[in-house]
Amino acid sequence: MNPFLSFLVRTFITLPTAFIVWLISFFAFDKTFLLSSGIALASGAMIWLLVSAVMKRRFLKKHGLTRREYRYIKKNLDEAKQKISRLNKTLFSIKQITSLKDRIDILRMVRKIYSMTKREPKRFYEAQTFYFSHLDTVLELTEKFNFLSGQPTKNRELGQSLNDTRHLLEEMKTVIENDLYQVISADIEHLNYEMDVAKLSIKPDETRRLK
């Protein structure tokens, strides 16, 4: 659910309804201004909650999820959001230019997986390895790399650790790419199926033209 869009929908339904209730209470039933306002506020709160419940129910039905499943997914997404925020901060704290492109690519793919999962929560099941393992690994490696590269003095051992960490980050870039592919694999299969169907529908037309 897009939080901003959800807020707009609830607002556009709740405010006019509450205003109409106030008008009816004040003019039709001759209630006082304060009492009419109280009734309107109470009605608005009830409408807000009702609309929220209906929107959430439709959202869950659309994505084939139970409330329990959605709570579980949302909990993990909230935790992932905090990790991605740390990852973003750490990646751009590293001053080495040589690994900048890899860092940008990693962050772009991580955000893509998160945004797709948030928009379509059921994709979470295709990305569980990413959320429960790979995201933590990338975060740990980047924080370690940032710490080591920020040391004022460098020796051979420190340089080797930096080099090893850099190579591991390069390998994790490939791992995250595979995670992203796994998340969109169903879309790719569906697209290939649609293309096959389109090709089959085109062939009879070509055959008729040749005759």
Image (spheres, rainbow, N blue to C red):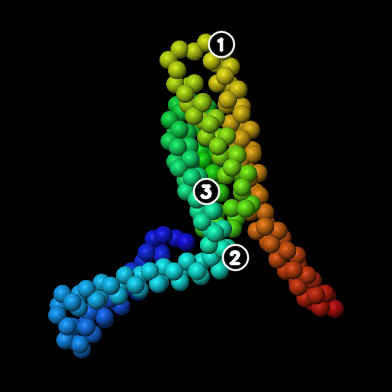
Q: Write down the residue under mark 2.
A: 64
Query: Which of the two labelled residues, at mark 3 and mark 2, occupies the earlier sequence position?
Result: 2
Q: In this view, does 184 lie to the left or right of 72?
A: right
Q: Where is residue 145 in the image (x, y as percent from the top left)?
A: 51, 26
Question: For numbered disc 3, what is the local secondary structure?
Answer: helix
Question: Which mark is nearer the camera, 1 or 3?
Answer: 3
Q: In this view, does 105 lie to the left or right of 55?
A: right
Question: For numbered disc 1, what is the local secondary structure?
Answer: helix
Q: How crowded is mark 2: few (under 14 residues within 10 Å), some or many (20 or more)?
A: few
Q: Write down the residue under mark 1.
A: 156
Q: Position of residue 141 (x, y in %)?
A: 55, 30
Q: Where is residue 208 in the image (x, y as percent from the top left)?
A: 81, 78
Question: Which mark is nearer the camera, 2 or 1?
Answer: 2
Q: Write down the residue under mark 3.
A: 76
Above or below for 99 versus 203: above
Q: What's the amino acid at mark 3?
A: Asn
